[in-house]
Amino acid sequence: MTFRLRHLLFLPCWLAAASGAWAADTDSRRAAVEQTLDRSPLCRGLGSFYWEIGDRRGPLARGSRGSPGGRQIGADTVMPIASASKWVFGAYAAERYDGRLPPQAVQALQMRAGDDRLQHRSCVRSKTVAECLAQGDNGGRDPAHVGHFSYGGGHAQKLAVALGLGDLDLAALNRDLHRVLPAAAGIDYRSPQPAGGMAASANGYAAFLRGLMGGSLQLGHLLGAEAVCTQPGSCPGAVRSPVPRPWHYSLHHWVEDGPGDDGAFSSAGAFGFYPWISADRQLYGILARQALERAAGVNSARCGAALRRAWVSGEVQDGPAPLADGTPLAAGPAVEAAPGNGRSRPLLEAWRRRRSVE
């Protein structure tokens, strides 16, 4: 019997064995995630949420968690995604420039353009991007901040005007977004703010993440590119960062590359929507919830990162995230926190009003 014939006869058995091993591996990883959800202090007490981990082909594991009597969140539940909008607009800009971003666009997407005076609440009643930019001092530029990282939505607002979006209302913005970025068909503007005004379901956002991973989007080839230092005090000239971790900021998304972190790409929002792509671009994940507590984005990111570690390692993560030296990180990896004292409530209520009249 020739080697080729023996190989062909053996192949079905090998495929069956490999398939069984993969299923067992997937089952053990899923179990590690489920037990992490049950036991980790980073995940308990989040209220109702939906979680999903997948690859380029689709979901590998997913589920919903909720408190008794609370709102149930599923894969198709649409919610405001706040700063998770930034990743989408970054991808939109990369498509508009065909992957060859000019220096002024790179600077805006790095939040180094000095356009850091926009107040989100001032745009609650704005109809267009330009109208939002014209409110108060939203269009102001601080010359001392040009070239230095300063987190805020004004950079994207000005870039959107430069891209010709200034006079578009929500309907026109969405038509243009979906034309340029078909992978974002399940994501919509609900406020004319590219850095924070979109809404999506986990299903809709997951399709966008798979587009980034699969190479169909220009930004998928630029994940982590042009990353800049963000921490005031340790980074020359850095002005303001919502992340008390030494992460870098790429083209409208974070690189989770601090001590003890795994290098994932992410863009969590203030109401608790946390999307991510693994550093090797093989996995994506979402933790989707809608909350008003002060650190909703922080808390979702901490739990989401623990679920990612559980899936990759196949081991339950039931303690705080460790630093590189082994000491526990009590605060966990943090991202943009919702303002305290209910100051984020006007934005969420405005989104609900817009949704109710559609």
Image (tube, rainbow, N blue to C red):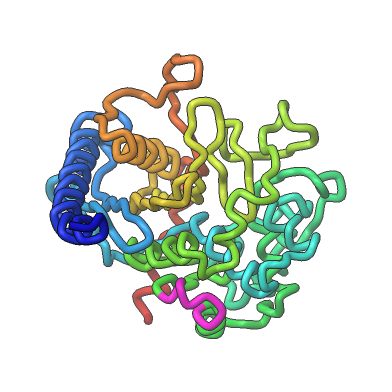
Which residue is located at x 39 percent, y 52 percent? 284
Which residue is located at x 86 percent, y 50 percent? 143
Which residue is at the front of the view, 275 or 130? Answer: 275
On whether residue 31 falls in the magenta region, the answer is no
Residue 193 makes an appearance in the image: no
Q: Which stretch appears magenta?
A: 178-185
Quadrant (top left, top right, bottom left, bottom right) of the N terminus: bottom left
Q: Quadrant of residue 204?
A: bottom left
Which residue is at the front of the view, 86 or 153? Answer: 86
Say left or right for 134 vs 256. right
User: Where does residue 236 sit, x and y in percent of width and height?
Assistant: 79, 32
Residue 148 makes an appearance in the image: yes
Which residue is located at x 24 percent, y 49 percent? 48
Say left or right for 339 vs 106. left
On whether residue 183 falls in the magenta region, the answer is yes
Say left or right for 224 vs 347. right
Which residue is at the front of the view, 213 or 304? Answer: 213
User: Where does residue 147 sit, x and y in percent of width and height?
Assistant: 81, 47
User: Where does residue 98 sit, x and y in percent of width and height?
Assistant: 67, 73
User: Where does residue 162 sit, x and y in percent of width and height?
Assistant: 75, 73
Does residue 28 sit above or below 102 in this rendering? above
Residue at the outermost right position: 143
Q: Quadrant of residue 222?
A: bottom right
